[in-house]
Image (tube, coloured by chain):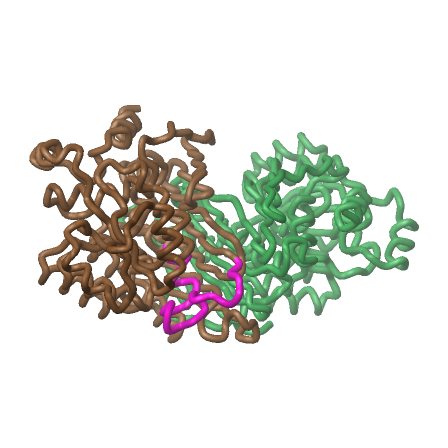
Chain colours: A green, B brown
Amino acid sequence: MSDRRDILRGIGAGLAIGLGSTASARALAREKGRKLGYAVVGLGYYATQQIMPQFKNCEFAKLTALVSGTPEKLTRYGAEYGIPRTHWYDYQSYDRMRDNPDIDIVYVVLPNGLHAEYTIRAARAGKHVMCEKPMATSSDECRAMIAACKAANRKLMIGYRSRFEPYNRLAIDLARSGHVGPTREIVAAHGFPIAPDQWRLDRELSGGGSMMDIGIYSLNAARYLTGEEPTYVSASESTDRSDPRFREVEDRVNWEMAFPSGILASCVSSYSSAHNRYRVTGTKGWIDMEPATSYAGQAMRINRDGTTAPRVLPTPEKNQFTAQLDHLAQCVLTGDTPLVSGEEGLRDLLCIEAIYASAREGRRMEVAAV
Amino acid sequence: MSDRRDILRGIGAGLAIGLGSTASARALAREKGRKLGYAVVGLGYYATQQIMPQFKNCEFAKLTALVSGTPEKLTRYGAEYGIPRTHWYDYQSYDRMRDNPDIDIVYVVLPNGLHAEYTIRAARAGKHVMCEKPMATSSDECRAMIAACKAANRKLMIGYRSRFEPYNRLAIDLARSGHVGPTREIVAAHGFPIAPDQWRLDRELSGGGSMMDIGIYSLNAARYLTGEEPTYVSASESTDRSDPRFREVEDRVNWEMAFPSGILASCVSSYSSAHNRYRVTGTKGWIDMEPATSYAGQAMRINRDGTTAPRVLPTPEKNQFTAQLDHLAQCVLTGDTPLVSGEEGLRDLLCIEAIYASAREGRRMEVAAV
């Protein structure tokens, strides 16, 4: 199957993701050996346990600075990653990153409610920005972030790591190329039973419940698997407000999306049950991923012509975290637009706003245009 | 696990399904060796290839009469099953079944649009009725059928065979008993790419598209797995009206249902893609069935405490078809109410009407009360 070989070749080659042009490849070749410096902002679990350990495998990126409000974290991770005290910042000294030429890119890994402020301040300090998803807590914030980066002539990318994960990339290509016939249905479910007492349950910091967190994987998957923007959404919420975890934010949201080509998607987002899967069903079979968007261990099965078989890919040279970090560095070096730009983050927020409105009002909602 | 043993014991015993009381068991013991006579109405694929071959395995039921508008079918199946010409009927002579004491039960396997008429005529002819699902094409028809059977003091059962299938029975028990924690989410998908030129695509005969056919499996499963009635539904339809199959009826309907305990269900019904599965997710794991409601070959996996394992049941003494045929005969003999009565069929129709209305009007719809 030539489609699979092409995709594997693309995944295997370090430069292939989102950098198609010959000019880009040449620009990158000239920069060979150069690594751009990242400042990681917010030293929580995801930053310290998932992202920071990946820099050692990067081709174009290195960790050069740390930002935290907790001095002990700066001391600890500064020592662990050999980051000198001159490259430690807190949220007061944040804007002084402007004067540090070792920092090219700022990676915002803060609670959602702080994404906009620290993205805008980073852009104004002359830095390119990688921002975790959800991009922000409202589409207005997203627009302000895009505008700030544009005004500063800095790149903005959102941390949708699945777009750099080989199985998800293969699923996208197979689904869009009609490997199981034209797609008719997508079912996507993401959730986990959330532990109490954390920022995700604080509305001001999170902007919402499961839908602003794990649910975005179902939403984004439905969009990247179709390559289309939903025309409308229809949503239902269920939250036990007597559960102390859900005093401020919602537990579960299920929603449908209709796409222009006629595809329907049914999605689940949950903070009280575990889900990590999607299935794309076409007229001739289906592509199933479970787990679909985990940190590792993706598993794919394909049903075609009445037969179901697992599809196993070789381990890629770069995992999804490394590829994502390198991608933005490569885009900075070449001038290319990131595969997952601020507009992509904005599109998800527009959908989320429509989903919340639909669940609240009990009626179908159109998704606002970018 | 005592719950499993109890269920298996129940499934193994011929009398266990829906016949709990000692009085019923005694009544049945007195009738041992007696088989009630069924007339099968409508000699299409499902009747002739799935139902009629099962009578030979029944304990309390036998095939004694045939109804068809096609003389060749009466000749052919009359010979195959040893049914004498005196026990052949067409739709004109149908009511004369009244005078045939060899017929106790009439099994209506006609297109949906004919269920009401032939159920009511059977009851008026003094016969008990098994009617295929969907019970009818409207809740009004369902009420008329229930009333006619009640007036004639005859039993009415709807052919929801999955309620007699061991894996589905186990799934119901595990889900309702909290084996994977209280249920939070149900995802159920049923569909198949429909062949052109058949009664299912003729609105007058079918009453609708996939939702009036394969979709009812998703709906009924969500209801039997929860044991609750939905408080509201929210639905979306997608149909390519340029496809000659879908001139009169819909292709796909996706819908959500909210249940009183807070459970949400996301369901898929399709006439253009293949689906046959459901998953019940609780706070501690999930129960997955795929295929879920097929004629045979059900497969169950259970995830609990982070481990996923298949669950394999022994082959039952009676398969779902045989158990279903025997069940109504047993109820007639004992006076018990069928496990899946006319009210159960009516409840599904009330949901379907709300689903269609929701898809049409683009807003959440409450489900009308029985």
Q: Quadrant of the N terminus of chain B?
A: top left
Q: Quadrant of the C terminus of chain B?
A: bottom left
Residue B290 highlighted magenta (yes or no): no
Q: Is residue A353 left or right of residue B128?
A: right
- Residue A14: give x, y in percent of width and height: 81, 44
Q: Quadrant of residue A22?
A: bottom right
* Residue A194 position (above or below residue A212): above
Q: In which quarter of the image is residue A203?
A: bottom left
Q: What stretch is highlighted in magenta?
A: B193-216
- Residue B91: give x, y in percent of width and height: 28, 67
* Residue depicted at x 37% and y 43%: B53
Residue B198 highlighted magenta (yes or no): yes
The answer to whether residue A171 of the structure is visible from this angle is yes
- Along the line of sight, which residue is nearer the eye, B203 or B326? B326
- Residue B269: give x, y in percent of width and height: 44, 59
Q: In this view, does A217 lie to the left or right of B50?
A: right
* Residue depicted at x 51% and y 44%: A276
Residue that lies at the very extreme toward the left in this rendered image: B23
Q: In this view, does B83 lie to the left or right of B308?
A: left
Q: Quadrant of residue B300?
A: top left
The answer to whether residue A60 of the structure is visible from this angle is no
* Residue depicted at x 17% and y 62%: B146
* Residue A310 position (above or below residue A278): above
- Along the line of sight, which residue is nearer the eye, B30 or B243? B30
* Residue B322 position (above or below residue A226): above
